[in-house]
Image (cartoon, rainbow, N blue to C red):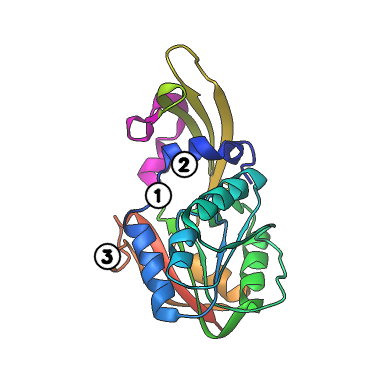
Amino acid sequence: MGEAFYSHARLYDLMFPGGGPAADFYRAGADRQGGRVLELGCGTGHKLIPIASDGHPCVGLDFSSEMLAEAQRKADARGVAVELMQGDMRAFDLGRTFDFVFIAANSLLHLHEAEDLVSCFRSVRRHLAPGARFVFDVFNPSVRMLAEADGVRRTRESLSFWDPDRGNVRVDVAESYDAPAQVTRGTWHLSTDSEPDFVVAPLEIRSIFPQELPLLLSLGGLRLVERFGDWSGRPLAVESPLQLCICESA
């Protein structure tokens, strides 16, 4: 589940500051749907806190206590009420239903086994109110990019960030692709000039190919209503960066 990677919540927020079209998409979706909102894998609240600030009753579930603590700190700082709880998206029972459930930012891909994905979808289905929507985004696998995951450590310039405590932080990643498991196994290195590799954390992400996704949803009691290839709502195509899925109870 990537516990070591997500134990550095403050650094995570500096590396991935949030906002942008993804946050706008989920915020607009919650507004259209109305009612109660549940985010699975809510992390530090990048998307859930703005939704809660719009007046929606919001619940966030995450596996990492460190990420939840940072989300609570941010919600308190903004004066926003959000119910946060630690749990596993593979199997959860919150004793209530929701009108809008979402999983953002590839968080679903921490579930590597088909059985775990189906279990998650079944748990989601039990928490959907009549007429509710379940929305999530995962990347659209590129065979070319997967083939380039050769285990060589490379700097990710786009992810480098400024830490007020440490200065400029460089992010290096070494990844290899396990084709039978459909899992990219990576090691992330965070370094400064004076403190090399002050964080070294594994991160393993599954690929879900477009043809298998509707079947997995079906086994979980869900139906794919729409699937887009980017945040502007273009149809899924060969070069689409992501699969943005709108689902309902089957």
Q: Is residue 151 magenta?
A: yes
Spatial CA span between label 2 and label 1:
7 Å
**Where is residue 32 drawn, in percent x and y?**
39, 79
Residue located 46% across and 11% down the image = 194
**Circle on res. 57:** none
Q: Secondary structure at mark 2?
A: helix
Residue type, mark 3 in image? Ser
Q: Secondary structure at mark 3?
A: loop
Q: Earlier in the sequence, mark 3 or mark 2?
A: 2
**Can you name the residue that lies furthest to the top here?**
194
Q: Please indicate whether residue 250 sits to the left or right of residue 32 in the image.
A: right
- The alpha-carbon separation of the residues under discs 3 and 2 comes to 24 Å
Badge 1: how crowded within 10 Å, few (<14), some, or many (20+)?
A: some
Give the mark toward the camera: 3 or 2.
2
Residue 28 is situated, as x and y percent measured from the top left of the image, at 36, 71
Quick check: 72 above or below 232?
above
The boundaries of the magenta stretch are 142-162
**Rendered position, 158 above or below 39:** above
Q: Position of residue 141 (x, y in %)?
A: 41, 52
Q: Residue at the spot x=62%, y=73% of the render?
A: 220
Give the residue at the far bottom of this rendering.
Answer: 130
Image mark for residue 18? 1
Q: Are marks 2 and 1 in contact (CB under 8 Å)?
A: yes
Eye-nearest disc, 3 or 1: 1
| Residue 48 in view in this figure | yes
Q: What residue is drawn where x is 36% and y is 43%?
A: 144
Say few, some or many: other residues with alpha carbon within 10 Å of mark 3 (under 14 / 14 to 19 / 20 or more): few
The residue that mark 2 highlights is: 13
Tag of residue 232: 3
Picture quadrant where residue 121 is located: bottom right
Q: Is residue 221 visible?
A: no
